[in-house]
Image (cartoon, rainbow, N blue to C red):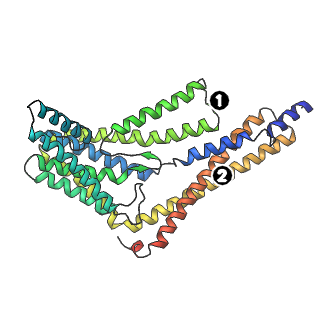
Amino acid sequence: MTQQTLAIEKAALSPASAQSSPTKRERAAQIRKSFQRPKFWVMGFGWCLAACAGAANVIAFKSWNLYASHVTGSTSAMAFRLEGYHQGEFGSESFREAFFLVFSFLVGAYTCGLLIDKNQVHFGGKSFYGLALLMNSTLLILAAFIPGRLLPACLVASACGLQNAMCTSHFGAIVRTTHVTGTVTDIGSTLGRISMIYLRKGCRRSQLDHIERAEVGVDARKLAVLFGLWSFYFMGGLIGIYEENLMPGPRALLVPAFFTGSLGLFYMAFRQLLKEHFKKLEKDRFEADLKEAQEAIAHMGSRLHSLESGNNDGLVVELDEEMGHMIEALHEVEADFDNLCRQHSRDSKDPVRRNTV
């Protein structure tokens, strides 16, 4: 190894040349912090609710020729009916149906806001997820047995509004479980961002810098949530069609009602056990991330030792990659630690409700 090579590598690692690198790493850390690793039980919770909503919406259309969760379509229908009024073709019945469907969805979402005071899923605490799920189930059961057309459809719309408001945000990604327009929009724009990053670098991941890798990682985790929602909504629609064929009419709504009601009863009965279980999972994940961070630091130390001993072929690039991995691991530890602290803070502020359903 020549003295010139050593001088070049020392210059690359000197504080003066590294002034821009920490800035990029800080920006990458902020990007990663905008979206934490999805929790599997939260994703499963949202996906199952999306399947129930897909089934309920299809059953409502087949039973009453009305889409319960299509607020966009109902709002457009109101505009069409008002336009027809000026042409002498005003259909008061159609306008009334569209208006009450939108209003019912709004009432359901409003009710959820009264029961759940956070727009981000957090099991435990003061949020009445169990009661919200039971109310959702009750609305679907009433819609299955109440005669008529508009009233039962409005009950399904209220159930959709209530459910949709239960999980509006998931660690930086907007989550809707009763319609998929926004979900497909987010999937398309996220895929476009990832594709553009790779196209700029000739489709070579090794050419990505810290910020680009952070952006790709965050978008990939968002896609896992969003594509799962769309897939389960689609599968729920298929299930709803077959349910309605087996149980003609709105009685097929009893299937999603049974699922949401069972989930609500289970949550209310085992709320404290679930809370302790989730706390344990958070603790285990914190310990795993801490161990990963320790291993990354130890690996970084061995790389630096190799640099000092003279084995420096391509080591500067590897050190840069190891530094990025170490910072990401430490960020995960920080996020998990913050979650544990927030959970402890909620428990200390709410000692009475902590032991009640």
Q: Residue furthest right?
A: 3
Look at the numbered disc 2 and give the secondary structure of its residue. Answer: helix
Residue 207 image-quadrant placement: top right
Q: Is residue 169 left or right of residue 85?
A: right
Q: Which mark is residue 293?
A: 2
Q: Which mark is residue 195?
A: none
Q: Position of residue 241 (x, y in %)?
A: 20, 39
Q: Is residue 325 left or right of residue 48?
A: right
Q: Position of residue 339 (x, y in %)?
A: 53, 59
* Classed neighbour count for the residue bearing mark 2: other residues with Cα under 10 Å, few (<14), some (14–19), many (≥20): many
Q: Is residue 341 left or right of residue 143?
A: right
Q: Looking at the picture, which amino acid does disc 1 mark?
A: Gln
Is 272 situated above or below 264? below
Q: Looking at the picture, which amino acid does disc 2 mark?
A: Ala
Look at the numbered disc 1 and give the secondary structure of its residue. Answer: helix
Tell me the CA gap for discs 2 and 1: 24 Å
Q: Is residue 100 left or right of residue 93?
A: right
Quadrant the C terminus occupies: bottom left
Residue 73 image-quadrant placement: top left
Q: Residue furthest front?
A: 86
**Residue 234 visible in the shown view:** yes
Q: Position of residue 105 (x, y in %)?
A: 24, 49
The residue that label 1 is drawn on is: 207
Identified at 59% across, 52% down, the residue is 332
* Classed neighbour count for the residue bearing mark 1: other residues with Cα under 10 Å, few (<14), some (14–19), many (≥20): few
Q: Position of residue 274 (x, y in %)?
A: 41, 63
Identified at 57% across, 44% down, the residue is 31
